[in-house]
């Protein structure tokens, strides 16, 4: 471990396990959190250390060495997940969904037909680039990136693919009533634009029109399964349900707020699509200084991004990761079910080292190294109270089960 392992090998292992546990609960620790916890950990274990006592934090040098000693912990950009989504990933609801999915696959002889299992969903793209990480001169206080506008127009993309890896051409929804043919210039072949008076969001009327003129002409003969998210606009029209039945389209909705784990397009396509699209926007702005990205240039930008994101590999990966095809409910990881995980289970996710429960000793058990890394004796204190695991829980409490969110009464 080297001389910079001031906490001691076993204590560092406890800290590393705690970091993983917090990630598993949906409350990952920041760099600052870890530095503060390391300082408090050393203080409460009475370990001699060289951490900054005025800031009450471990130093950056210690953090870098800690990450080198624990290569299974890496720095990642955290993605926000709303409480509603956490609440949606409920084992009972997800289990019921997979039961229904399995029944539909078996009853309609689709279990071995990946070309007949589809997923459709929408995602918004803004006509703008998004500033990312850039290189700049050391000491620069602020680095600016030119954008097309403060906030570009949002255009909704309707994507659809099957478990075999085949994509339908994308369809787009733009706000307004007057559709111009040049809006489709440069778009992927077969693409279509729908206009919506109020907003660029999908409606039941647009979904039905998409089924009629975009999906049905391209579906294989016989029955197909079309997976949708829980949005009400997909299944709130009697005409749409009758049309789907007449054309052997089996519609199956996922539980609300679960698409981030259960939907193939969310798992493997949309993030890539947005990343490539905004990169194309950035390049376009660099090549066209002073000009704004408009609907007229949207098609060519989408075409370049679509070709990189809408790949057979991504589609197949998304269906596999979501447990749809091959059918596999166990594909959903345990950490997805944050909302209904028992507190004891959360606490012990990464507990791999023994925790002493003896109350006969008056000193903390030696979880550290010899010499200056060894915790000092604390007279009159039970060993259980001062184990590193107990101290970590006191310093950085593990969140309990997420409480149900209720709407305020009007």
Image: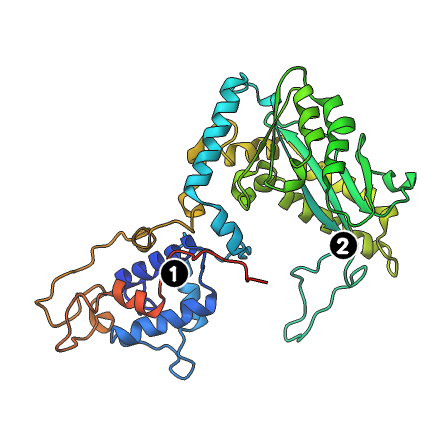
Quadrant including the C terminus? bottom right
Q: Is residue 123 left or right of residue 320?
A: right
Which residue is identified by label 2? 282
| Kind of element beneath mark 2 | helix
Q: Is residue 286 left or right of residue 9?
A: right
Out of 404 and 54, give the one closest to the viewer.
Answer: 404
Q: Which mark is residue 122?
A: none
Vertical relation: 258 (above or below) 141: above
Which residue is identified by label 1? 399
Residue, far front: 410
Q: Where residue 69 appears, x then y in whole percent?
A: 37, 58
Out of 59 and 402, give the one closest to the viewer.
Answer: 402
Name which residue lies at 45% across and 46% down: 336
| Kind of element beneath mark 1 | loop
Q: Between label 2 and label 1, give the one nearer the viewer.
A: 1
Vertical relation: 63 (above or below) 21: below
Asked whether residue 167 is in view, the answer is no
Asked whether residue 243 is in view, the answer is yes
Image label count: 2
Mark 1 residue crowding within 10 angstroms, few (<14) / some (14–19) / many (20+): some
Name which residue lies at 41% across and 67% down: 34
Name which residue lies at 82% across and 38% down: 193
Give the Cα distance between marks 2 and 1. Answer: 40 Å
């Amino acid at each position: 471990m080297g001389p910079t392992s001031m906490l001691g090998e076993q204590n560092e292992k406890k800290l590393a396990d705690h970091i993983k546990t917090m990630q598993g609960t949906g409350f990952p620790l920041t760099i600052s959190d870890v530095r503060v916890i390391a300082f408090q950990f050393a203080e409460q274990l009475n370990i001699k250390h060289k951490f900054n006592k005025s800031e009450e934090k471990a130093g950056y040098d210690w953090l870098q060495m800690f990450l080198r000693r624990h290569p299974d912990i890496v720095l990642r950009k955290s993605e926000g997940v709303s409480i509603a989504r956490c609440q949606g990933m409920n084992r009972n609801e997800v289990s019921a969904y997979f039961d229904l999915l399995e029944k539909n696959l078996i009853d309609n002889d689709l279990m071995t037909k990946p070309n007949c299992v589809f997923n459709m969903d929408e995602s918004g793209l803004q006509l703008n680039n998004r500033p990312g990480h850039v290189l700049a001169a050391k000491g620069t206080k602020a680095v600016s990136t030119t954008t097309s506008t403060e906030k570009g127009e949002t255009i909704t993309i309707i994507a659809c693919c099957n478990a075999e890896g085949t994509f339908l051409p994308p369809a787009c929804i733009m706000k307004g009533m007057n559709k111009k043919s040049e809006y489709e210039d440069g778009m992927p072949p077969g693409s279509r634009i729908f206009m919506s008076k109020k907003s660029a969001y999908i409606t039941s009327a647009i979904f039905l029109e998409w089924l009629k003129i975009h999906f049905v002409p391209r579906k294989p003969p016989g029955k197909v399964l079309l997976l949708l998210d829980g949005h009400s606009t997909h299944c709130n029209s009697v005409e749409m349900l009758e049309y789907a039945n007449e054309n052997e389209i089996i519609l199956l909705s996922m539980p609300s707020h679960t698409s981030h784990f259960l939907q193939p397009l969310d798992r493997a396509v949309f993030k890539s699509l947005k990343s490539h699209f905004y990169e194309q926007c950035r390049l376009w702005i660099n090549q066209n200084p002073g000009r704004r990205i408009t609907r007229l240039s949207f098609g060519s930008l989408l075409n370049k991004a679509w070709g990189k994101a809408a790949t057979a590999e991504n589609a197949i990966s998304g269906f596999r990761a979501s447990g749809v095809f091959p059918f596999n409910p166990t594909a959903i990881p345990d950490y997805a079910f944050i909302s209904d995980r028992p507190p004891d289970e959360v606490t012990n996710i990464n507990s791999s080292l023994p925790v002493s429960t003896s109350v006969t000793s008056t000193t903390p058990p030696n979880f550290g190294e010899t010499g200056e890394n060894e915790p000092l004796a604390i007279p009159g204190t039970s060993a259980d109270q001062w184990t590193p695991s107990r101290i970590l829980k006191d310093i950085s409490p593990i969140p309990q089960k997420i409480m149900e969110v209720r709407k305020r009464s009007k």
